[in-house]
């Protein structure tokens, strides 16, 4: 139901204390209020269900966010471990590189020495070895010198082979460490990518949680409003029922009706209407009671006061004056009442005949139909204040 229609229903709830033909209108209003209560209760149940659904969604999102947080902590721990492992491998690679360089220097030196010896042997010929050998003092010394020369040559060759073998081993270790380093770099990139993805998911989750929280607050406010409307409507149903019963009792009191009729003013309705028409176009002013600006009841009071007919100031008070008159018995000069922005007789006009009235409304003093699409549903009764 549109908000305006709800307000219209809520605003059509005041009953005349003495309106016999107002009773059908009240009965209609009562039925509308009862239907409205049922609809509002259904709407309240929907808000309860929506709030419960949003709270469940919020709980699910919170659990999901906790999972993202745990995953991020694990990723951060993995990145930290990866960085520590990478630093160790980098240090090992650095040490192996230094060893390779050191061994290369040693190998180059040994090769240079061996090359120098070979060159000397080539340049000086076999005489040098013969001189060493023949310089021996005995045969045993000769054999010793020969064996010594062979040992020296073998050791120099073995030394070169050992350095070369060590160099090759170190390079293998270096390759292994470099491969491990490359794997650690790839793993770190994967961890960082996963970290970014989890951060994006966590951010989206927080946005969803904010939206759900806003929905819960909105539905809670809506629920409070609906419950308030239910309470207000139920109170007004009770009020309508009580006032309707009171009005029925008053209408059965012949003394009361006769007393009301005896107070009616003897003034020409045509004079009232002619005078009222002089103020056509006068602007509407809330609380206005003069030709510079009228509200609805101020206009009616001013017009009737001109002819010595004293009416109360507000439309609610005027609704309790005069004699109730049915729709079929409306005559020019009668007051017609409507329930608009709030419960009760919140608007009044002067009936002109043929279903028309003159009144002060938002557009100013104008002539309008009593039973058109706007005023008709808001009509709650009429009062006769002239004989």
Image: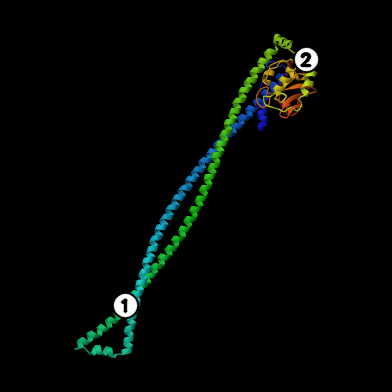
Give the label, 1 or 2, closer to the camera.
2
- Mark yes or no: residue 48 visible: no
Q: Dot 2 surroundings within 10 Å: few (below 14), some, or many (20 or more)?
A: some
The image quarter containing residue 90 is bottom left
Question: Which colour scheme appears in the figure?
Answer: rainbow
- Mark yes or no: residue 271 visible: yes
Q: Residue at x 65, y 32 (%)?
A: 3
Outermost front residue: 292
> What is the total number of numbered labels drawn onto the structure image?
2
**Dot 1 corresponds to which residue?**
158
Q: Earlier in the sequence, mark 1 or mark 2?
A: 1
Front residue of 16 and 122: 16
Q: Residue at x 41, y 56 (%)?
A: 81
Give the image location of residue 317, x and y in percent.
67, 18
Q: Dot 1 surroundings within 10 Å: few (below 14), some, or many (20 or more)?
A: few
**Dot 2 corresponds to which residue?**
267
Give the image location of residue 153, x and y in percent.
29, 82
Quadrant (top left/top right/bottom left/bottom right) for the C terminus: top right
Q: Is residue 206 above or below residue 234?
A: below
Q: Is residue 110 above or below residue 226?
A: below
């Amino acid at each position: 139901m549109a908000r305006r229609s709800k307000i219209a229903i809520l605003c059509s709830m005041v009953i005349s204390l003495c309106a016999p033909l107002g009773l059908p209108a009240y009965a209609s209003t009562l039925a509308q209020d009862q239907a409205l209560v049922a609809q509002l209760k259904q709407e309240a149940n929907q808000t309860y269900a929506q709030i419960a659904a949003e709270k469940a969604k919020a709980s699910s999102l919170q659990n999901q966010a906790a999972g993202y947080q745990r995953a991020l902590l694990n990723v951060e721990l993995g990145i930290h471990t990866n960085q520590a492992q990478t630093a160790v491998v980098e240090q090992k690679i650095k040490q192996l590189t230094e060893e390779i360089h050191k061994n290369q220097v040693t190998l180059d030196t040994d090769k240079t020495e061996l090359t120098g010896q070979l060159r000397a042997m080539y340049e000086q010929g076999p005489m040098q070895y013969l001189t060493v050998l023949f310089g021996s003092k005995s045969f045993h010394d000769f054999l010793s010198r020969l064996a010594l020369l062979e040992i020296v040559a073998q050791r120099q060759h073995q030394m070169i082979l050992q350095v070369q073998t060590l160099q090759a081993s170190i390079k293998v270790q270096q390759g292994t460490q470099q491969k491990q380093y490359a794997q650690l770099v790839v793993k770190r990139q994967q961890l960082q990518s996963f970290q970014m993805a989890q951060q994006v998911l966590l951010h989206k989750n927080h946005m969803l949680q904010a939206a759900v929280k806003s929905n819960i607050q909105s539905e809670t406010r809506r629920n409070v409003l609906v419950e308030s409307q239910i309470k207000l409507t139920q109170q007004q149903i009770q009020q309508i029922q009580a006032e309707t019963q009171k009005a029925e009792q008053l209408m059965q009191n012949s003394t009361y009706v006769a007393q009301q009729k005896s107070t009616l003013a003897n003034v020409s309705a045509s004079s009232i209407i002619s005078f009222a028409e002089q103020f056509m176009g006068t602007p509407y002013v809330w609380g206005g009671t003069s030709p510079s600006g009228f509200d609805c009841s101020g206009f009616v009071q001013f017009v009737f006061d001109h002819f010595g007919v004293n009416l109360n100031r507000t439309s609610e008070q005027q609704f309790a004056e005069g004699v109730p008159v049915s729709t079929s018995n409306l005559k020019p000069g009668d007051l017609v009442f409507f329930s608009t922005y709030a419960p009760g007789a919140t608007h009044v006009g002067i009936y002109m005949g043929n279903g028309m009235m003159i009144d002060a409304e938002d557009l100013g003093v104008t002539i309008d139909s009593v039973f058109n699409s706007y005023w008709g549903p808001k009509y709650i009764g009429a009062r006769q204040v002239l004989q």
